[in-house]
Image (cartoon, rainbow, N blue to C red):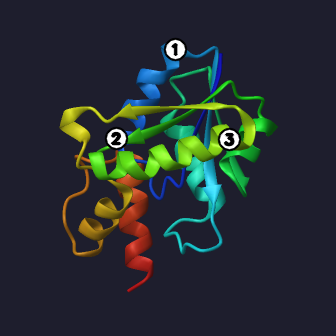
Amino acid sequence: MRILFPGTYDPVTNGHLDLIGRLVPLAESLVVAVAINLEKRPLFSDDERVEMLKAACRAWPTVEVRAFRGLVVDAARQVEADLIVRGIRSSAEGDRELQMAYTNRALTGIETLLLPASPGLAYVSSSLVREVARFGGDITPFVPPEVAERMYARLREQL
């Protein structure tokens, strides 16, 4: 089975990595797809996000990291995914993701699996990490060490 796990990953968090680690044994191959969304203004460039994810996923040989533009279903078709997986942290997020899952299935027939976050990481989000870092807080419990270093360096550049 080939699984597509799309997201913005700005930055990749330990929550993302927990989900990836839980998906690896279920998939023959797992494509972690970094969304390029022209509507958003990410802290890191597309290439930087791909690079950080590749480094964070190095231990899993069946994981491929790539960027994509456009609809998730187009990325799923492009990589010939059998399944799309989305992580959810809350019931409110689940409602929105469920609507997207129905839409994706109507467009392509590809099913979406909504995978709940591990309880100890359910509060961790990329936007939370960015905000904590911007105000000088310690983000090391939420992201890999290399990502924390890059976040702090990027924020120093912006001062």
Q: What amino acid type is highlighted by mark number 2?
A: Asn
Task: Identify the disc placed on residue 34.
Answer: none
Question: Above or below — where is 83 with respect to 28?
Answer: below
The image position of residue 10, as x and y in percent, is: 47, 59
Residue 48 sits in which quadrant? bottom right
Instruction: Bin the neighbour count of mark 2 within 10 Å (Cα to Cα): few under 14, some 14-19, many 20 and up.
Output: some
Instruction: Bin the neighbour count of mark 1 within 10 Å (Cα to Cα): few under 14, some 14-19, many 20 and up.
Output: few
Residue beneath disc 2: 14
- Front one among 55 and 21: 21
- Front one among 145 and 97: 97
Q: What is the spatial separation of the Cα atoms under label 3 and label 2, in whole angstroms?
A: 32 Å
Question: Who comes first in sequence, dot 2 or dot 1?
Answer: 2
Task: Identify the disc placed on residue 106.
Answer: 3
Q: Nearer the viewer, mark 3 or mark 1?
A: 3
Question: Who comes first in sequence, dot 3 or dot 1?
Answer: 1
Left or right relative to 99: residue 81? right
Q: What amino acid type is highlighted by mark number 3?
A: Ala
Name the residue located 30 percent from the left edge and 44 percent from the top edge: 89
Name the residue located 38 percent from the left edge and 49 percent from the top edge: 95
Residue placed farthest to the bottom in the image? 159
The image position of residue 110, as x and y in percent, is: 67, 31
Residue 30 sits in which quadrant? top right
Name the residue located 74 percent from the left edge and 38 percent from the top edge: 108
Q: Nearer the viewer, mark 3 or mark 2?
A: 3
Residue 115 sits in which quadrant? top left
Left or right relative to 2: residue 74? right
**Residue 90 visible to the viewer:** no
The image position of residue 93, as x and y in percent, is: 35, 51
Left or right relative to 136: residue 29? right
